[in-house]
Amino acid sequence: MSRERGEQVVGHWIGGVGVEPSGGVAPIFNPALGVRLRAVGLATLEEVNRAVHAAAAALDSWAQLPAQRRARVMFRFKQLLEDNRAVLAAIISEEHGKTLADAEGEVSRGIEVVEFACAAPQLLKGELSNNASTGIDTYSLHQPLGIVAGITPFNFPAMVPLWMFPLALVCGNTFVLKPSERDPSVSIRLAELIQEAGLPQGVLNVVQGDKTAVEALLHHPAVSGISFVGSTPVARHIQTQAIAQGKRVQALGGAKNHMVILPDAELDSAVEALVGAAYGAAGERCMAISVAVAVGEQTAERLIERLRTRLSHLKIGAADTPGVEMGPLVTEAHRARVREYIDAGEREGAQLLLDGRTVGSGSGFFLGPTLFDRVQPHMRIYREEIFGPVLSVVRVPDYAAALQLVNTHQYANGAAVFTRSGELARRFVQDAAAGMVGVNVAIPVPVAFHSFGGWRNSMFGDYSVYGMEGVRFYTRLKTVTERWPDETRTEADFSLPTSM
């Protein structure tokens, strides 16, 4: 697609400077207004190669810096993020559509990972066994992978990149980020801020683009690792291709998160948590609750009554509207896709209690909260990830049936249980086959010093994101066995060193 006359174009960040794109462009919309804001460049193969080359040129000097000096850059970057939190949130809201409060929360969660990365001198400490065998010491080193690429989604254009590159950088790697082309502007601002914090040129590079840029990074021989967050089909493709080329990979895919409401749950607080988890950010979250599992008919009826009342007062509008709780979807195409799922739910016999299609006939990509009851596991709205403001209520007779739903779904990112029973909560924590579990917490996204990752078709690769799992992903373990000359020992040794 060609750029419009005089239109601003979001470009790349290569070698520490902004780069005007040389290829085609894609439009960027303001989802609340439904109008084209600007365009974004789509990287050519040559531009991706330039970014990787810049990362390669900066690698040795950056990797050889003491971890403490790398961490000092992160300390300054953290402060700059805090100083610019409102500005970053405004950029996110304009291109994504989420509320300003939600966008500021996104930036805050990203800052938490930067804060964790500031602990690099401690995180990268190895282990030592002094005199592991007579006269022999053994110790371990955590060394950088090299050049790492990150491919990030539209729904968290600041947070997910901040999950990746700060930790990769303090581990001594250089990084090439490929953000979503739907809301790319914040990625350039992040690159500017971290360079202002003292990051050498070329250590972080940003290439805008689409599938061409992704495939170029995936197949580039100088790239040693790929971090990805997106849909399951692409995550599976990323894993397959990366492993075939000997690259390390962490690839987070889709989700269908369940919230189990037991009969003894404190229902008012459960409903408030459910509404925020299902409809916050218009449901465009990989940790959104899209299935409410009501245990028992009485629980279901009470839940439905409270949900209908609460959702009738849900305030929908642009990010800067006072008191707004839910914004638009990111594009018109995505809104159309979510509407098709609502159509399918009706056709397959689910009971449509609230129809979001009645909202948003004017400007902007708005869709109202949609609520289905009596959803069955064979229905598409239950089986597939919708990524929109659509909540399905499934009625089950008991705890065992609820657990069966959680443990047999193709996705296993997160699951939550709401109950007053410590016994049942503990059972759920042990029994739920999902990567992240909440007890009376609807969105159990771990804090930065733990790690984020799902099971089954929600994650591909051996390492979760951030926390110590992130440190392990971005480093290679090297174990050293060391002996210094001993004048009393002169004969050849034909056996392996032992501790005997």
Image (tube, rainbow, N blue to C red):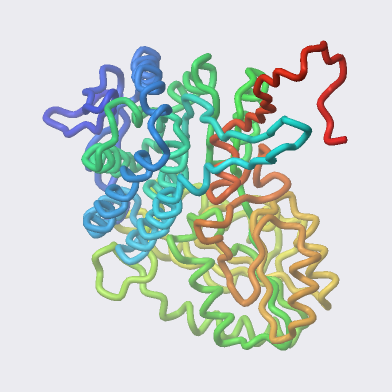
Q: Return the x and y of residue 377 as percentages of the image width and height.
A: 76, 59
Q: Residue at x 40, y 36 (%)?
A: 179
Depth check, front residue: 324 or 346: 324
The residue at 45%/30% (across/down) is 173
User: Compared with residue 165, is residue 84 higher up or lower down, i.e. above or below?
Assistant: below
The residue at the point 68 percent across, 55 percent down is: 435
> Is residue 440 found left or right of 309 in the rendered image?
right
Horizontal side of residue 137 vs 475, given as left or right? right
- The front one of 270 and 372 is 270
Q: Residue furthest left?
A: 6
Image quarter where the C terminus lies is: top right
Q: Is residue 155 visible?
A: no
Which one is in front, 27 or 481?
481
The answer, for residue 71, to whether it is visible in the render is yes
Is 226 located above or below residue 289 in the figure? above
| Quarter of image, res 459 | top right
Residue 253 at x, y = what percent? 60, 43
Instruction: Work out whether 47 lies above or below 468.
Output: above
Q: Residue furthest front?
A: 488
| Quarter of the rendering containing residue 183 | top left
User: Residue 23 falls in which quadrant of the image?
Assistant: top left
Give residue 429's position: percent from left, percent from top. Answer: 74, 68
